[in-house]
Amino acid sequence: MRNLAVDKPNLFIDSGLGGLTTLFQTQALLPNEDFIYCADFKNSPYGNKTLKQIQNIVLHTLKHYYAKFKPKSVVFACNTATATTIQEVRKRYPSLVVVGAEPAIKPAIKSDAKKILVLCTKITLNQSNLVKLFRIHKKDILDFCVLPELATLIDNNYSSNPQLIHKYLVEKLATYKGKVEGVVLGCTHYIIVGENIKHILGNVKLFDGNMGIANRLKQCLDMLDLLKDSYQNDQTFYTQVGKNMKSEKVGKNLNSVGDKFLQKAEQNDQTFYTQKSPAEKRNSIFLTDVGENVKYESVGQVKLISTDQYKQSLLLQNYQHLLERRKELCVV
């Protein structure tokens, strides 16, 4: 008998844009799955808050969207949320698949890099059990650099003012040039500016944990027979306003939606969008939901949600930019 939970979505939670890189990697590995991505702009950044504040925020966000969507898994595509809250979530939701983000320190240490720089938030540095362990036992090859403003700078300036982000990175990282061979990106936001980091530090190898997260989710779903194995080969773009549904053919490239897409999102916050495309193309599929009524039209969908309605168009715009870089951001 088919497990009905197979058809439920996978919920991704992050404070902003960073977790989209985790989502892209997971989509590449699991193209038949449905995803809901929550960008918690309302409470970002997480990394500068107290432990208790982060726990309350993350637990409240999960409670709301778990009740609304009944996901089969939750992925904390955020190192800070993982370090502070994942154990409590596992206690409260024992039947839910829960996957978190950890800095990719293990593969970095196993590499041939003799000196490694770990970039992270203050909370991750102080709360992650993995980081604490390596700070003790591998202190001879590891340096740690806290970047308290970087995630917010990326969320607010990635597409509009990238020069500001680069200036900040130069100020924080210039002293490490020529002194490290590997860099661990201890926040899912950081891979977005990976090329900037390499430009500043020189010939360094970057390590991010997105493939590990995707593999772990696949492993967990597979163990519980929760993986989807079907896909409807469809390329229809749906727009729903209230109860009226209409569709437009948009071809194979999401970019064909363009400004028209963003204009509709800005004009009516009850509008949501879905694109479907063939699994082998692995094109991004997304939906914006600001209202309460959401339903699935096929497998392989992604729903994007901003907890701050005024940043919904910002989320969509940056999603478009990142989508164009997906091959660069993902491990093939």
Image (cartoon, grey):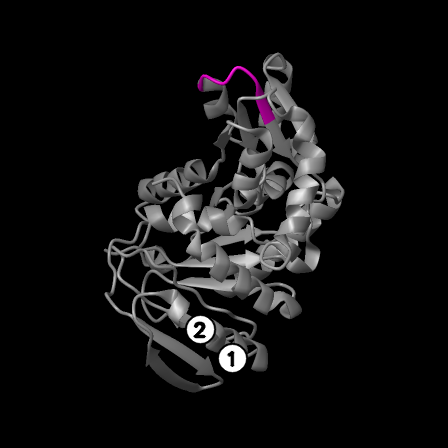
Dot 2 falls on a residue whose secondary structure is: strand
Is 286 a magenta residue? no
Q: Residues within 10 Å of mark 1 (few under 14, many from 20)?
A: some
Q: Are marks 1 and 2 in contact (CB under 8 Å)?
A: yes
Nearest to the observer: residue 225 or residue 246: 246
The answer to whether residue 226 is left or right of residue 306 is left
Residue found at x 52% / y 70%: 289
Q: Which mark is residue 46?
A: none
Q: Relative to 329, is 203 above or below?
A: above
Give amino acid for label 1.
Answer: Lys
Residue 294 shows up from this direction:
no
Residue drawn at point x = 68 percent, y = 47 percent:
46
The local crowd at label 2, few if under 14, some if 14 to 19, many if 20 or more residues have their Cα within 10 Å, is many
Q: Secondary structure at mark 1?
A: helix
Who's the residue at 49% across and 74% down the image?
A: 259
Q: Say if the magenta span includes residue 116.
A: yes
First in residue order: circle 1 vs circle 2: 1
The residue carrying mark 2 is: 273
Q: Position of residue 26 (x, y in %)?
A: 40, 47
Does residue 140 appear left or right of residue 33 in this picture? Answer: right
Nearer the viewer's eye, disc 1 or disc 2?
1
For residue 175, what is the image quadrant? top right
**What residue sits right under mark 1 in the picture?**
264
- Residue 290, image x and y in percent? 56, 72
Q: Which is more toward the observer, 181 or 276? A: 181
The quarter of the picture where the N terminus appears is: bottom left
Residue range in magenta is 111-117
Q: Along the horizontal axis of the image, is 313 left or right of 277?
A: right
Q: Quadrant of the C terminus?
A: top left
